[in-house]
Amino acid sequence: MNNFVDLQINGCWGVDFNLLDLSQQDWDRACKQLMESGTSHFLPTVITDSIEGMTKKIDRIAGLCELKSEGSAQPIGIHVEGPFISPISGYIGAHPKLHAIPATLDNAKRLIDAGRGWIRMMTLAPEMDLDAKVVDYLARQNILVAAGHTNASVDQLQKAIEHGLRCFTHLGNGCPPELHRHDNIIHRVMSLRDQISVTLIADGFHLPPWMLRMLIEWFGDDRTVIVSDAISAAGLPSGYHTLGDRRVWVDEDGVPRSEDHSHFVGSGATLDQMLSLVQRIQPWTDSTLKKLFRDNAAKLLGMSAQT
């Protein structure tokens, strides 16, 4: 299959979507490479930075999204991941702790305005929006609101769901490697499986293959979306690459890690590579694979599955 829809991609083939000076030439090259690898539609993703820095990056990408190019993957919106996420070590993941801040309507509106109608998804931590005013505002703007990089309680997740939260970003990642054996963010989200969809990174490293299979079975093929979370290293050999203003080391296994190897920094895989892994884990039907890699993502964005 092809025509993948990727809800979270930070860059690929040496192109970093989180650069302030992202050029049209690099953008066009990335879009062409994505199409060649089977991804027809995607959400370029802007991660946590200062509000000023994020608005500049969002504005730049929004302008590039307006440029149509034949034979290239088409952006269908922008995914804003942060800055309203947990600053706690582990939950913050690869995001800069300095810029993780509580959610406010003013800052949310600044980000949305910078996108000029292109922002289609935002990931935040419900405990950084305790009254759920920002979740409610975003949902009323027809923006897909996802929880992520969060240690929200079940009650906080439930409140956010009641105000419009519909998804959880890369479940099993964006959290510490050691968690309470019962009451942890993974189990809390699993307990709400009938109310929320999840995205999963299927590169074989962010989640062990057996856990990836288990989560797909637990949430079902109607509520699961595979995302790449790829950074500029995707499609390139090992070495140093970038994500915004930071350097990222990629080992021979193709996995981007922080320089101290304490955590992953996005992935180095694209959806076509992830499809191969998922097919090896379990002989899913073609119908299920289409849901995981295309249809469910399109559905969450209110689009036709045949995008």
Image: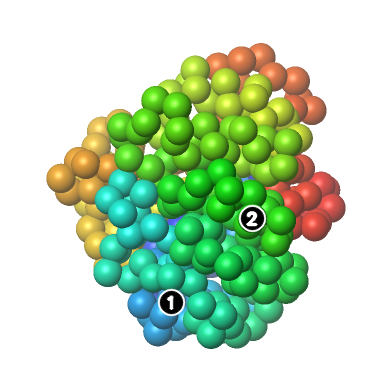
**Of the pair 88 and 301, the residue shown nearer to us:** 88
**Of the pair 86 and 248, the residue shown nearer to us:** 86
Amino acid on which disc 1 is placed: Met
Q: Can you tell which mark lies on residue 159?
A: 2
Check disc 1: other Cα within 10 Å, few if <14, some if 14-19, many if 20+: many
**Of the pair 177 and 237, the residue shown nearer to us:** 177
Q: Which quadrant is the N terminus positioned in?
A: top right
Which quarter of the picture shows residue 12? bottom left
**Of the pair 11 and 37, the residue shown nearer to us:** 11
Q: Is residue 182 left or right of residue 258?
A: right
* Residue 157 to residue 54: above or below: above
Which quarter of the picture shows residue 76? bottom right
* SS of the residue under disc 2: helix
CA distance for labels 1 and 2: 27 Å
The residue at the point 51 percent across, 77 percent down is 104
Tell me residue 148's x, y (percent). 49, 51
* SS of the residue under disc 1: helix
Which quarter of the picture shows residue 272? top right
Amino acid on which disc 2 is placed: Lys
